[in-house]
Image (cartoon, rainbow, N blue to C red):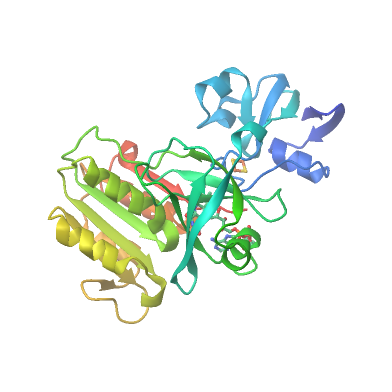
Amino acid sequence: MAMITYKGESYTCEKDETVLVCLLRHKVFVPNACQSGVCQSCMMKAVQGTPPKVAQTGLKDTLVAQHHFLACICKPEEDLEVSLYDSSKDWMLAEVLEKSLLNESVVRLRLKPQHKIDYMAGQFINIKGQDGTSIRSYSLASLPTEDYLELHIKRVPDGLVSNYLHDIVAVGDSLSIMGATGDCFYTNRDQAQPLLMIGVGTGLAPLYGVIRDALAKDHTGSIHVYHGSLATPGLYYIDELRNLANEHESLSYTPCVLHGDAPEGGQQGDIQSVVRTDFPDLKGYRVYICGDPQIVDSIKKQCFMSGASMADIYSDPFDFS
Ligand SMILES: Cc1cc2nc3c(=O)[nH]c(=O)nc-3n(C[C@H](O)[C@H](O)[C@H](O)COP(=O)(O)OP(=O)(O)OC[C@H]3O[C@@H](n4cnc5c(N)ncnc54)[C@H](O)[C@@H]3O)c2cc1C
Ligand code: FES
């Protein structure tokens, strides 16, 4: 069992326990959100001792070189003395420029950050909730060339931050944001490669950015977009995606609904079965899958089994703790 020393106090880390769980168990607060090594809100620094390499997955080289690590995926193999990463310089204010409902449970926010942020379409930012300590990640549906950041936020029953963004935040308010990060974005390494994009619910947000980015970068291969929801009212951007498909011969758009009738040109059924039937062989395809973590994980396995190479599967599971 490793000992974790933080602010002069030492805590026993149980076998298979992460540094985050160990500290929280001892009532030591560490910022966190996804608890799965994605959002980077739990970043800490090893002052003494070496964190396992896997706990540095996705961190910039400069952060790795300074012994930073993600507490939520760090199962220490030796005693560690740790400090909190000082993220204060990474946060900035962003003004809410526009707020509108995309359907009964998804709100669109457009934000103007205090400073321009460098990002790739499809990456995500972190936002602080009303209490100033809760942090949640939201994917960017905008393009870096657009002069606002666009987010699609689904209301989660009893959800702290999503309900704050739905009910309390108003146009003109400022939000604390940090980012962007994430590796679900378009690269033009093979412009003729066929792309398959699968989004569930607000999983469309990053894809809406990635699709338009690929088109803006003159992707020549076909682009197949599937957007899934329980029923038609849960879909959104139907007209926008149809318009894109009308403007670009290479693009096809298929809305999928589990229950009830699908919109024209769509399919009824679970999105995973629909994709399996439409794409029995995914050899040579690049696949993007975003949204509910369980569905993303399951479709990811299916796409691999259907022949897509793991290196060609980009996924953005909306993990939550
Ligand atoms: C990389 C990344 C990108 C994301 N992008 C988006 C995005 O573009 N749009 C978006 O709407 N969300 C996105 N999310 C999810 C988002 O970060 C929050 O987890 C979500 O808004 C819920 O936060 P909350 O504070 O409202 O709920 P919480 O207060 O955290 O949770 C309330 C309760 O609901 C449960 N819960 C939380 N989320 C869900 C869920 N999705 N389904 C079922 N139960 C849940 C919790 O376990 C808890 O019991 C993303 C997550 C990640 C990691
Ligand atoms: S990366 Fe650790 S809480 Fe998200």
Residue closest to the far right? 9
Whether residue 77 appears in this view of the structure is no
Relative horizontal placement of residue 198, taking residue 52 as reference (left or right): left
Q: Which residue does the image show at 22% across and 76% down from the upper left? A: 264
Q: Against 183, is 236 above or below?
A: below
Q: Against 21, is 290 above or below?
A: below
Please tell me which residue lies in front, 36 or 154. Answer: 154
Q: Which residue does the image show at 54% across and 61% down from the upper left? A: 171
Q: Position of residue 197 (x, y in %)?
A: 30, 53
Residue closest to the far bottom? 260
> In terms of image quarters, where does ligand 1 lie?
bottom right
Please tell me which residue lies in front, 319 or 74. Answer: 319
Relative horizontal placement of residue 220, taking residue 261 as reference (left or right): left
Q: Quadrant of the N terminus?
A: top right
Q: Position of residue 102 (x, y in %)?
A: 42, 68
Please tell me which residue lies in front, 47 or 135. Answer: 135
Q: Against 26, is 240 above or below?
A: below
Relative horizontal placement of residue 158, taking residue 316 as reference (left or right): right
